[in-house]
Image (cartoon, rainbow, N blue to C red):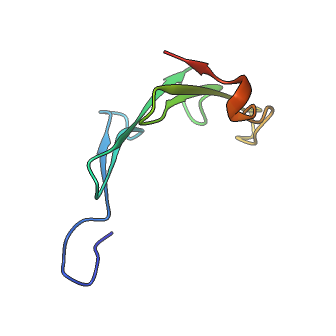
Amino acid sequence: MFDSNGQPIITNIFSPDGFVIRQTLSDRRSFMYSYEGSGRPRTRSVVTDPEGYVTHFVFTPDGYHRSLPERPALAVKR
């Protein structure tokens, strides 16, 4: 995605198997993504935000969320 000046708003870096592993915003803050399981969809994913907070997601075999992230006050900071 680009803004009206042609500058990227979001830049994604993908793993060899096509999953987003890093997402960088226009202000250079980044989100990191990791995945568990094989094939598609993956069964779990972990997102680390620019502040270092980690959110775990669990998915059903159909790819739907089985769990939702916790409130930030309960999140684990790495």
Question: Quick one: which residue is furthest to the bottom in this view?
Answer: 4
Residue at 54% from the left image edge and 27% from the top image edge: 53
Question: Quick one: which residue is furthest to the right in this view?
Answer: 66
Asked whether residue 30 appears in the rendered view, the answer is yes
Q: Is residue 71 left or right of residue 55?
A: right
Residue at 24% from the left image edge and 65% from the top image edge: 8
In this rendering, the answer to whether 70 lies above or below 28 is above
Residue 55: quarter of image: top right
Asked whether residue 58 appears in the rendered view, the answer is no
Residue 15: quarter of image: top left
Residue at 77% from the left image edge and 36% from the top image edge: 68
Q: Position of residue 25 (x, y in %)?
A: 33, 53
Instruction: Please identify the quadrant where the N terminus is shown.
Output: bottom left
Q: Position of residue 40 (x, y in %)?
A: 57, 35
Q: Is residue 29 left or right of residue 53?
A: left
Q: Position of residue 7 (x, y in %)?
A: 19, 70
Residue at 47% from the left image edge and 35% from the top image edge: 49
Closer-to-camera residue (58/39): 58
In this rendering, the answer to whether 36 lies above or below 61 is above
Q: Is residue 32 left or right of residue 60?
A: left
Picture mark count = 0
